[in-house]
Amino acid sequence: MIKLASPDIRQQDLERMLEVLNSGQLVQGANVARFERELAEFSGIEHATVVSSGTAALHSVLSSLGIGPGDHVIVPAFTFPATVNVVEQLGADVLLCDVDPKSYVVTPHALEKVIVAHPDKSVKAIIVVHEFGYPAAIEQIARITGKYRLHLIEDAACALGTIADGQHVGYFSDAACFSFHPRKAITTGEGGAVITQRQELADKIRNFRSHGMQPQVDGVEFVAAGLNYRMTDFQAALAIGQLERFSQEIEKRHVLAEAYIQLLADDERIHLPEIHPGHSWQSFMLVLPAEINRQRIIGQLAESGIEANLGAQAINLLSYIKGKYRTDENTCPVATNLFAQGLVLPLYGKLKREDVKFVARTLKRVL
Ligand SMILES: *Cc1c(COP(=O)(O)O)cnc(C)c1O
């Protein structure tokens, strides 16, 4: 079976993890601190805070920025529901922005249209999702959030290593959030991180992830209603080697994604994703035409030993969003189509060029 995703976990990573397990120091410790230093170094963003999931990262940032009841947050309509769930959990409301059909991310123009269309709403923030690692036009978006005095958060769950406008994600925004779920390019099982250049925000997030506890000379004080969003130390140990090898991993993904595009370009029924030099290629999603039944394709690929899947959700079609905001498939037609017809193919560094050829050939055969 050619799997959809496969983490690059090696013997030395397992040994490092075992060392932590044998030490008995299981909760957040030296390996979390080291992983944080190395994430900051890798991204060039000063403060990195490791947490227990990508969702925890998003929740910590939005809560620390003071997002709450009465606030509106603009989110892309094509993403994983966690992007929206954290907004709803904080008692705020979402405004959906449809995405671009080729890059699958929001454009500055579309975001500004949503802002000006809701002068009566108190828009407080924009969450940009670099879907599958494709870099959204973040510098221009930051100019817009500056103009309207909004917070800018990057849901970079799939975008560690993504370079947007010449900088690693996290540079132009208040903060960027990562996930280390096994579907992402680096994994700790469950895990996440926030990077930010704002010291004060980083301090708040660190406090929030650890019960709102503040060390004092004579013990601790609980200064805020924080949560427990810490990562265990053996999880961080698993990530350190993966991060060291990550630049090569991204390079391999670039080569393989370009091979897919080259091999599939002659079939005009297939809509291929946009390439970009700053793309980190967490996933390779193409779009099938409306007349092709995606479920049949996924089934026939599976019969040939190839795992394939849908890409992300159309938020306008989630049942609780439909109920609360009266949305339907026409609210965000691009997201609706990407959700219905998007097809993710296997992509990871260990994948061989022959595997990519086999997948491309099989796909064209079953279409
Ligand atoms: C995976 C993902 C998340 C959630 O991350 P978890 O670590 O699973 O909590 C959030 N947003 C996007 C865009 C994702 O792809």
Image: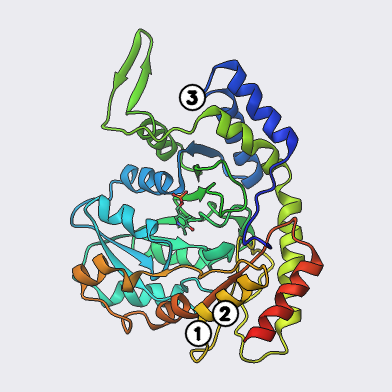
Residue drawn where x is 40% and y is 79% of the image: 336
**What residue would you read off at disc 2?**
297
1 and 2 marks in contact (CB < 8 Å) = yes
Per the image, the residue denoted by label 3 is 27
Q: Label for residue 293?
A: 1
Can residue 286 be seen here?
no
Q: Nearer the viewer, residue 358 or 100?
A: 358
What residue is drawn where x is 34% and y is 15%? 220
- Residue at the far top: name it: 218
Q: Is residue 24 above or below residue 305?
A: above
Type of amino acid under label 3: Val
Task: Measure the alpha-carbon separation of dots 3 and 1.
Answer: 47 Å
Neighbor class of circle 3 (other Cα within 10 Å; few <14, some 14-19, many 20+) is some
Tag 1's secondary structure? Answer: loop
Q: Residues within 10 Å of mark 2 (few under 14, many from 20)?
A: some
Does 143 sit left or right of 84 as displayed?
right
Q: Do we see residue 211 in this rendering?
A: yes
Mark 3 or 1, which is nearer the eye?
A: 1
Query: How many angstroms separate mark 1 from mark 2 (CA)?
Result: 7 Å
The residue under the point 46% across, 48% down is 54
The front one of 365 and 336 is 365
